[in-house]
Image (cartoon, rainbow, N blue to C red):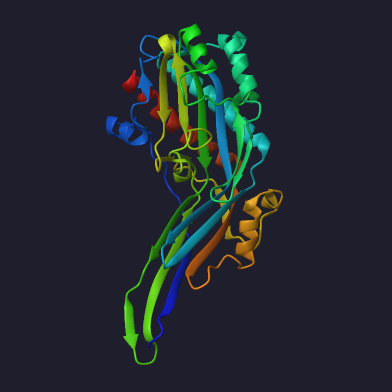
Amino acid sequence: MNTLIKKLASTALLIIAITGIVQAQQPTEKEIKQAFAPKGTHRAPFKKATEAALTSVNLQFKLATRQEQEKRKVGNVITWGFLEGIDDALLQEIANEYYKSLSEKLKANGFSLNDSYKDHKSYQKLVENNTDLQREINKKNWGVAKIFTANQAPYIEYPTGMMGAHASLGNDLKMPVGQLFITVDFIEITQNISRGLSSFTLTDGSSRTDKFETDMRPVIRIEGITAASMGKQFKGDGTYAKFTGDNWSYCNAMFQNGFNIVSNVPYANDVVVADGIPESMKKIKSAVVGDLASIFSRGAVKSGRGNLEATYTIQANPQAYKKAVLDALDKYNDYLIAYIKANN
């Protein structure tokens, strides 16, 4: 009996050059339908409104991103990217500036911001109900992130259902009262696994060459919900805006799985292959460190199968990173306003 010999062709590529800045264009009706989950509006809270409120504008900044692709009986590709050179002060600054730009965009489209919600009992109830929300996220199958709220306001998440303090708040104030959650990633990862064709030679017997590839680009992305959260309560993952209004109306603009907005503004000073666990990751007390330690010690190889493990560290230019993030967020604002107009 001939033994099947699996030959592995593994490739890890760095795609660093990003040139040119594309002028922002208003999203089309087709693009809006591709971006957002369907049936997200009931009784059109923005239809006759001239004012709106934002109780909580939350930006989730990814600091480490993990992606894995697996093919049955062939193998898997694991890619980690780490962001370095960005501190908490800059992330808070970006969140604050984004709030200003969103406010200006809403006002330019006929919706002045109103902060009377702060004195309402339902807002206080929302604050109380969300005191246990975590602002530091680390998941082995997803990555590491920190959440910053514009103007250091309380971090609030609206429930998916239509009953509760968030619904009462919009109904009592008779205007759209919303909560935003936006996920900002710093890397685009592409992976591929190809099962080769079996062949036979007198010297090797039966053999097969499988191909494993991964490449990455350091780009700022506003990303939709991930596959890991599909079918679960929509909270703390992806990008969405939830508004409630008069007559128990609501408008939920949620990016679909796999949809992303990408900035063309370059931000990376350098990209290198990581040669060990970054210092910023060593303090993460979760399975994340265990996964990284396994990879860097070559302990993640699955017996009898092929795999490719790639780890990259991106050294960011802080001001360029800020410019790229705000550029992507400005594009997101255009999508959000277009969705509101199309569905209200």
Q: Residue furthest front?
A: 1
In-image side of 323 versus 85 (left or right): left
Q: Position of residue 265 (x, y in %)?
A: 48, 42
| Quadrant where the image shows the C terminus | top left
Q: Residue at the location (47% across, 63% down)?
A: 76
Tell me if 314 is positioned left or right of 72 in this view.
right
Q: For this rendering, which residue is in front, 212 or 263?
A: 212
Q: Between residues 8 and 319, which one lies in front from this camera angle? A: 8
Name the residue furthest left.
30
Residue placed most toward the observer, 323 or 215: 215
Q: Position of residue 149 (x, y in %)?
A: 60, 28
The image quadrant of residue 48 is top left
The quadrant in which the N terminus is found is bottom left
Q: Do we see residue 113 in this rendering?
A: no
Residue 72 falls left or right of residue 309: left
Q: How many marks?
A: 0
Task: Identify which residue, 23 or 344, lies in the foreground.
Answer: 344
